[in-house]
Amino acid sequence: MDIVLLIKTIIMGIVEGVAEFLPISSTGYLILSADLMNFLQGDLRNLFIVFIQLGAILAVIYDYWGRLWHAFMGLLTGRAEGLANPRQLGISLIIATIPVMLVGFLAADFITKTLFHPLVVAAMLIIGALIIIYAEKNPRIVRAAEAENISFKTALAIGLCQCLALIPGTSRSGATIIGALLLGASRKAATEFSFFLGVPVIIGAALIDLLKYKDSLTSTSDWVVLGLGTVVSFVVALLCIRLMVSWVSRKGFMIFAYLRILTGVVVLVAFFGFNYQIQS
């Protein structure tokens, strides 16, 4: 592997590790970064993105293994150490996962063919920023201080919000975190519930994509690129999720709103000034 490809691979892993769990649209940043660097093409690029997204979600599983295991065992047995309602978190995550799986299955082709356009990405980045600003300036009474306290009704509403993340530029983390905030979750609970919700959603989507790109997977010789990107995204994501909970608990999400607006403006300038188009 030449040094230029090595550097590009590391950059892409860093972008995924940083952006996956921030409310700024990791997919949007991955697309923009890959296009800017002319990094891989076609199915190989898409396969690489699947691998680095798996690397990022493995960081959540590693860092929150204890709580996720308790949620899983509570779901199976009805007993979990330290939890008043052992099945609450597990059932809430299942409820919140169902809507995006259904909508994704039914609308995936339409989204890919119709909505992967710079104007859509820019618009959703800016609209999402405005919603973040509204949520931060109009705080709700906290009804769920921890992710384990989120009710089934709230989980369903968060799951419906997550469906918006299928639109490029929206951000899965942004849709779920801000949705949870508006529904009465604390910043910490909203952020961690979004982390946990990413486990079934991202792994499920990755399995579907691996089947979709199975020919590229079995024929590729770029295992070093795939492996390196995955490791980098795992390490960077691990650092970011630890920092993010502390940051948002103290500072909130306003900085991410400003970053979304800035990125949206850059995309608009690139489209209207340089005729930028998203590469497939």
Image (tube, helix red, strand yellow):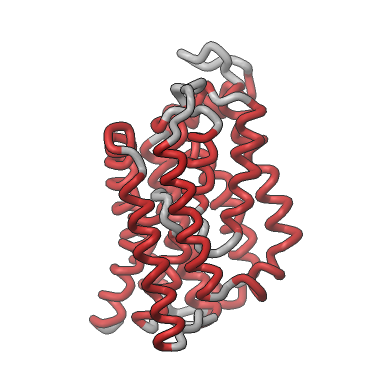
Q: Quadrant of the C terminus?
A: bottom right
Q: Quadrant of the N terminus?
A: bottom left
The spot of residue 20 in percent (x, y) is: 42, 54
* Residue for point 53% across, 73% down: 119
Name the foreground residue: 19 vs 218.
Answer: 19
> Residue extending furthest right?
106
The spot of residue 38 in percent (x, y) is: 38, 84
Above or below, 260 relative to 11? above
Using residue 246 as the reference point, say whether residue 101 is left or right of it.
right
The spot of residue 5 in percent (x, y) is: 31, 80
> Residue extending furthest bottom?
274
Q: Quadrant of residue 183?
A: top right
Using residue 102 as the reference point, say whether residue 10 is left or right of it.
left
Q: Quadrant of residue 251?
A: top left
The spot of residue 130 in percent (x, y) is: 46, 51
Q: Quadrant of residue 74?
A: top right
Above or below, 106 relative to 186? below
Name the foreground residue: 4 vs 141.
Answer: 141
